[in-house]
Amino acid sequence: MSFWIVGPPKEQTPMGDEVLVAISSDMDVVRARQTGRSMATQVGLSRSEATLLATAISEVARNIVEYVGEGQILLCTVNLNGMEGIKVVATDSGPGIENVATALQDGESSGGRLGLGLPGARRLMDEFHMVSKVGEGTTVTMTKWKGPGRG
Amino acid sequence: MPVPILKQGHYLVASIQDALSDGEVLELQENLLKQIGDFRARGIIVDVTAMDVIDSFASRSLRTVALTTRLRGAEMVIVGIQPDVASAMVQFGLLMDDINTALNLEEGLEFLDRWTAERADADGG
């Protein structure tokens, strides 16, 4: 099963800044969210927006460590019609998720845990897409934009 | 670096100094639950002022310590949740309805003083 949950990604212009964080341990989870926070601050996201982003990164990074073991998170600054933000692409080559829509429901978790991670991360971000193929892996793409009124 | 746990009177104060990995969160959880027995502590304060995020894992672990502490006859209070972290927790849907929180260390100590006094009254009456 493979589809976009929130529709295809919008056309975004990468602004050049890109950081790839390899994820294979709980320390990498911390590194990924801290890198994301510092990039967000540089682009001008507020402290609150940066914390929402960092929390969402923490969840998707942990999912990689817990369910797959290793993967990577690409963080990049993006620009859409003058709007700036941070895009996060979390990729793994794990077993994949059979039903993406179910995985994004509250309370659903194949690991038998609370299952708050993905649906929670989705609520924190402005855009959230998840695509997964059984036997090939999962990619979560999500973006946090700088809020209005802060040029 | 492990989170330092200081003994202050009948209370234990865990003062988180930096962002914590999941492993460090679990280590803190284990140490607190062990020390509450070792020191016969009546209360625990966990100061999370320095935590960069409180995500699903951290919040579940903190809740576990709080509820386990209560089962052992003591009480825990979380202090110092930063405003941006608090609003992210609400937006995420991480609820800590049954967990005590206070603004800062001072108010956390006051909370535990009141709690232990009330319990002493109840025991005495």
Image (cartoon, coloured by chain):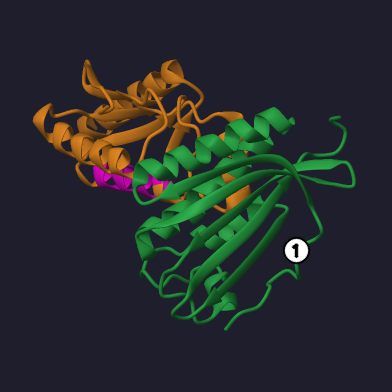
Give the chain coloured green.
Answer: A
- The residue lying toward the viewer, choosing from B122 and B27, is B27
Q: Is residue A33 magenta?
A: no
Where is residue B84 shown, x and y percent of the image?
61, 33
- The residue lying toward the viewer, choosing from A15 and A143, is A15
Quarter occupied by the C terminus of chain A:
top right
Position of residue A123 relative to residue A18, above or below, is below
Q: Colour of chain B?
A: orange
Position of residue B73 relative to residue B120, above or below, is below
Q: Residue furthest left?
A: B38
Q: Secondary structure at mark 1?
A: loop
Q: Amino acid at mark 1?
A: Pro
Residue A104 appearing in the image: yes
Look at mark 1 in the image and give the residue it sits on: A9
Count the numbered circles shown: 1
Where is residue B15 shown, x and y percent of the image?
34, 23
Where is residue B108 shown, x and y percent of the image?
41, 23
Chief secondary structure of the magenta portion = helix
Identify the residue shown where x is 41% and y is 70%.
Answer: A94
Q: What chain letter is assigned to the residue under label 1?
A: A
Give the magenta-colored segment's residue range.
B58-70
Identify the residue shown where x is 48% and y is 26%.
Answer: B80
Quarter occupied by the N terminus of chain A:
bottom right
Q: For this view, does B7 lie left or right of residue B50? A: left
